[in-house]
Amino acid sequence: MREPLKTVSEIIARSNDSLYQKHPHIDTIIGIMDKALRQQGMNSDAITIECPAQNKKIVFLLHDEKPDYISIAVGDKTGNVETSSEIGLENFSETMLMVMLEMHFT
């Protein structure tokens, strides 16, 4: 696993655990795509967090050409995107992500 993906996935996992501790009724699914996108010709890795009960999904994209940034898309499981943004890797934290998870999944 590439280093940026490892760092981001660890932050996401810890934030997801915190979300579950605070809101035990919210079930989420985390997915890591470290080979699938590359096999399709995209020089990117991705991590997804899905909340099936809410039909919500957050996708975190790590593009090789922008190693210091994370693209974040929020939408539903069918692929409709409500919002998208980009954040510097140095600003991506458990606290920031916890706010985002609570805002979209509660």
Image: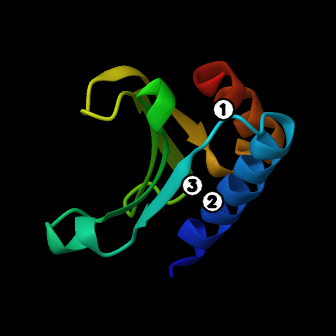
Q: Which element type, helix, strand or loop, lies under badge 3?
A: loop
Quarter of the figure that contains the C terminus: top right
* Residue displayed at 71% across by 38% down: 97
| The image quarter in which residue 28 lies | top right
Tell me how far mark 1 sits from mark 2, CA to CA.
15 Å
Q: Can you say whether 1 is above or below 71 in the image? A: below
* Residue displayed at 17% across by 74% down: 39
Q: Can you say whether 86 is above or below 54 in the image? A: below
Tell me how far mark 3 sits from mark 1, CA to CA.
22 Å
**Which is more foreground, mark 1 or mark 2?**
1
Would you name the residue on which mark 2 appears?
8
* Residue displayed at 77% across by 53% down: 17
Which tag, 3 or 1, sits closer to the chain's start? 3
Badges 1 and 2: C-beta atoms under 8 Å apart? no
Q: In the drawing, what numbered circle is on residue 101?
A: 1
The total of numbered circles placed on residues is 3
Which tag, 3 or 2, sits closer to the chain's start? 2
| Residue 26 point in image, percent of width and height | 66, 35
| The image quarter in which residue 88 lies | top right
| Residue 96 point in image, percent of width and height | 76, 35
| Residue 78 point in image, percent of width and height | 24, 33
Would you name the residue on which mark 3 appears?
68
Q: Which element type, helix, strand or loop, lies under badge 2?
A: helix
